[in-house]
Image (cartoon, rainbow, N blue to C red):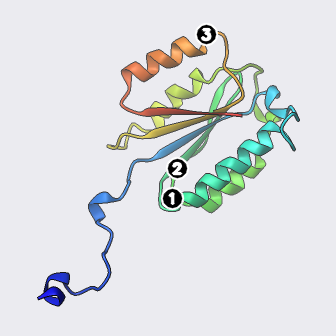
């Protein structure tokens, strides 16, 4: 009776209902302060390493990539191809931003645009070494009006 109750498999199979299908948007700070070398080799390089480590931990998740400084830009829309994301990530530098500054709230409207087609609640990972003066209030307002989760990884 034990063999019959165990079913056709001797191992427990993962439930397809338990699969985490919610996408992740990584928002990376590429402002000039990320070139600081108080964390070797630099804050930006360490951020790229941490994001790459995260990609290894979640191989099946759809991930998008945005960068910001004085303005925000979508680098890669939602994709399951982590190899292409790693190649884009390795090419990012603080010289890419057309305007100086530190305005993560600009990226949040881009996040909304990227996630407009998805029906899942998404996670947004903000990787930064600081915020602009008005950023906390604007980010609180965004969090209050969206279903997505905002996580901050401080460098």
* Secondary element at tag 3: loop
Q: Earlier in the sequence, mark 1 or mark 2?
A: 2
The one of 113 and 53 positioned closer to us in this rendering: 53
Q: What is the spatial separation of the Cα atoms under label 1 and label 2, in whole angstroms?
A: 6 Å
Residue drawn at (47%, 56%), measured in percent from left and top? 61
| Residue where numbered disc 1 is placed | 80
| Residue where numbered disc 3 is placed | 134
Q: Earlier in the sequence, mark 1 or mark 3?
A: 1
Report the quarter where the N terminus lies: bottom left
| Residue where numbered disc 2 is placed | 63
Rendered location of residue 86, percent (x, y): 68, 56
Q: Is residue 95 left or right of residue 129?
A: right
Rendered location of residue 116, percent (x, y): 39, 37
- Contact between marks 1 and 2 (CB within 8 A): the answer is yes
Residue drawn at (52%, 49%), measured in percent from left and top? 63
The one of 37 and 139 positioned closer to us in this rendering: 37
């Amino acid at each position: 009776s034990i063999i019959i109750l165990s079913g056709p498999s001797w191992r427990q199979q993962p439930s397809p209902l338990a699969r985490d299908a919610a996408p992740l948007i990584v928002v990376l700070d590429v402002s000039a302060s990320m070139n600081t070398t108080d964390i070797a080799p630099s804050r930006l390089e360490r951020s790229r390493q941490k994001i790459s480590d995260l990609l290894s931990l979640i191989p099946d998740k759809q991930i998008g990539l945005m960068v910001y400084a004085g303005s925000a830009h979508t680098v890669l829309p939602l994709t399951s191809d982590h190899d292409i994301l790693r190649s884009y990530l390795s090419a990012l530098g603080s010289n890419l931003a057309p305007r100086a500054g530190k305005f993560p709230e600009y990226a949040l409207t881009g996040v909304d645009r990227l996630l407009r087609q998805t029906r899942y609640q998404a996670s947004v990972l903000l990787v930064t070494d600081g915020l602009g003066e008005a950023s906390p209030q604007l980010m609180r307002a965004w969090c209050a009006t969206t279903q997505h989760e905002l996580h901050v990884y401080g460098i």
